[in-house]
Image: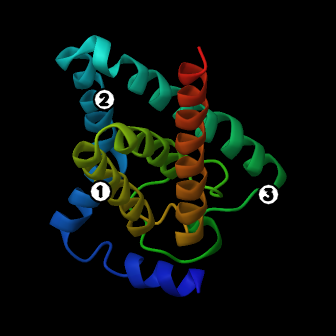
Amino acid sequence: MDLYLFNLINQFALKWEWLDVLAIFLAEFLQYFLLFGLFLFLVKDFKKYLRMIIEAVLSAFLARFVIVSFIRWILPRLRPFITNNVNLLFEYSGSAFPSGHAAFFFAVATVVYLYNKKIGALFYLSSILIVLARVFSGVHWPSDILAGAVVGILSGYAIYKVSDYNVSNK
């Protein structure tokens, strides 16, 4: 199933230059716009959004640098372009499973969503575009993305709930 879904998405890479450029932008550069968007919350209303920003950063750190790193250490997985003949747009090193990008950005999106549904939905959509572009580009399997997204969502929700519990019990 993983190979089937991967081929379904990756088959369109290297067919149209404009689509490849778009995929590279989404996979490699959209993330910086998301982080800038997170920063804009502080500019808009520092006091109101500071807690959200701290929770988003903590959950992203927990997801990407603690949980994903641990899983990669015990379950390393080669990237698609290493084990298969794929349409590769750029190379990326390290283990593929789970996706660090998915974990990081779904953690951020989850926290933002729990504070602001409308902007959070935009963060989720952007996260989906980032991770689909990484499959399209040949650097991740769909299951890498799914696992990373689950890690990110659970991390975001956990940090939000722990923070909420600590604030309400003061």
Mark 1 Cα shell of 10 Å, populated few (<14), some (14-19), many (≥20): few
- Answer yes or no: do the residues labelled 1 and 3 have beta carbons within 8 Å? no
Residue position for label 2:
38
Q: Is residue 146 visible?
A: yes
The residue that appears at 25% across and 24% down in the rendered structure is 41
Secondary structure under tag 1 reads helix
Mark 3: amino acid: Leu
| Residue 66 vertical placement versus 24 (above, below) | above
Determine the secondary structure under disc 2. Answer: helix
Of 55 and 66, nearer the camera is 55
Q: Horizontally, is 5 left or right of 165 in the view?
A: left
Q: Which residue is mark 1?
A: 125
Residue at the location (77% across, 43% down)? Answer: 70
The kind of residue tagged 2 is Leu
Q: Residues within 10 Å of mark 2 (few under 14, many from 20)?
A: many
**Residue 23: horizontal and vertical position, in percent?**
29, 60
Residue 151 x, y percent position in the rendering? 61, 51
Q: Say if residue 92 shows up in the picture.
A: no
* Residue labelled with disc 3: 75
Whichever of callouts 1 and 3 sits on the residue coming sooner in the sequence is 3
- Name which residue type carries label 1: Leu
Front residue (pair 157, 131) = 157
Distance in Å between CA atoms under marks 2 and 1: 15 Å
